Image (spheres, rainbow, N blue to C red):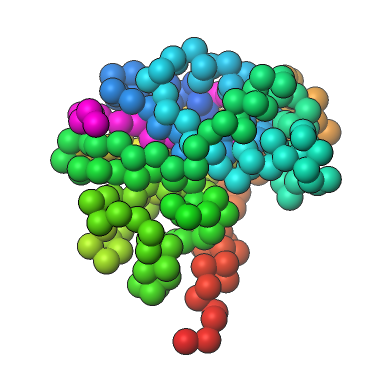
């Protein structure tokens, strides 16, 4: 297995092309040995445009499936009648059949060796499930559960899903969430992470009002104006997001 000096991690792009363009223009991303996408790539207002731009990056990009990607595939294949995210059916309909087949083929985890970090496991939500919730303040026994099947040789786990960046230790392992490129909670900007030899959480500022206007002009989904204002401007605070996600990490279960 090769060892990479720098790996850029982009999670939860959610079909927001201006945010993705801003991150890909970052010198550190352009110079990275690999770009890893930790899921929820195209479920949003500009799915085909995001798909096309990422495919242009070639084999330097490693793709991982997220729950939203799986939901688009299942919807297109008639395996489900609805998608929890209201914009999901719109995104699913926009994808070409070849895009659907590509998303269906994506792995749920990936392990790379990164200089300074050793073996790094990348996933969407947790290594065992694409919808499980773990948070910066999840209790130690929760981490015992979700990391139970991870080989001891893996000392760093990178996950997305909750759209909030953090770095923490869990039973001696480093857990990294790069936050969301396209739908951030807590503060606006396109959030991502640079790995090697350490972990560097980054946020790329871009012109949010201009991006929102672009989405409204280029996306004909009926709710796009409100969607763009809410998500690109990060109207949901980190406290609100933690309050909403908290019960889903099992913290309210009886001891």
Q: Residue 240's image quarter?
A: bottom right
Instruction: Describe residue 30's horizontal placement relative to residue 247 as left or right.
Output: left
| Residue at 34% in and 40% down | 111
Whether residue 84 is visible to the viewer of this picture, yes or no, is yes
Extreme bottom residue here? 255
Instruction: Describe residue 221's horizontal placement relative to residue 153 as left or right.
Output: right
Q: Is residue 122 magenta?
A: no
Instruction: Name the foreground residue: 102 vs 191.
Output: 102
Residue 12 drawn at (x, y percent): 53, 39
Instruction: Name the foreground residue: 206 vs 191.
Output: 191
| Image quarter (top left, top right, bottom left or bottom right) of the N terminus | top left
Which contiguous range is marked in magenta?
1-18
Numbered circles on residues, count: 0
Q: Residue 46's image quarter?
A: top right
Residue 235 drawn at (x, y percent): 60, 49
Instruction: Describe residue 179's horizontal placement relative to residue 74 as left or right.
Output: left
Q: Is residue 10 magenta?
A: yes
| Residue at 37% in and 53% down | 166
| Residue at 54% in and 81% down | 253
| Residue at 38% in and 27% down | 35
Residue 125 drawn at (x, y percent): 49, 51
Whether residue 180 is visible to the viewer of this picture, yes or no, is no
């Amino acid at each position: 297995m090769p060892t990479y000096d720098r790996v850029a991690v982009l999670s939860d792009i959610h079909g927001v092309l201006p945010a993705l363009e801003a991150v890909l223009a970052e010198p550190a991303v352009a110079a990275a040995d690999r770009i890893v996408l930790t899921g929820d790539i195209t479920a949003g207002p500009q799915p085909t445009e995001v798909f096309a731009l990422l495919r242009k990056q070639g084999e330097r990009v490693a793709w991982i499936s997220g729950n939203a990607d799986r939901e688009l595939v299942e919807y297109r294949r008639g395996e489900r009648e609805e998608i929890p995210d209201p914009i999901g059916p719109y995104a699913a309909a926009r994808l070409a059949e070849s895009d659907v087949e590509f998303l269906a083929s994506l792995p749920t985890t990936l392990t790379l060796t990164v200089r300074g970090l050793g073996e790094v496991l990348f996933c969407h939500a947790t290594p065992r499930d694409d919808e499980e919730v773990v948070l910066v303040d999840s209790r130690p026994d929760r981490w015992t559960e979700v990391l139970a099947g991870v080989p001891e040789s893996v000392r760093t786990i990178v996950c997305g899903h909750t759209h909030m960046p953090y770095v923490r230790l869990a039973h001696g392992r480093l857990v990294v969430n790069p936050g969301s490129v396209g739908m951030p909670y807590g503060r606006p900007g396109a959030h991502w992470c640079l790995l090697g030899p350490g972990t560097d959480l980054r946020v790329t500022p871009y012109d949010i009002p201009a991006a929102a206007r672009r989405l409204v002009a280029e996306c004909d989904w009926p709710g796009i104006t409100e969607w763009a204002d809410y998500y690109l401007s990060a109207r949901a605070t980190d406290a609100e997001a933690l309050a909403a996600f908290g019960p889903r990490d099992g913290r309210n279960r009886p001891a």
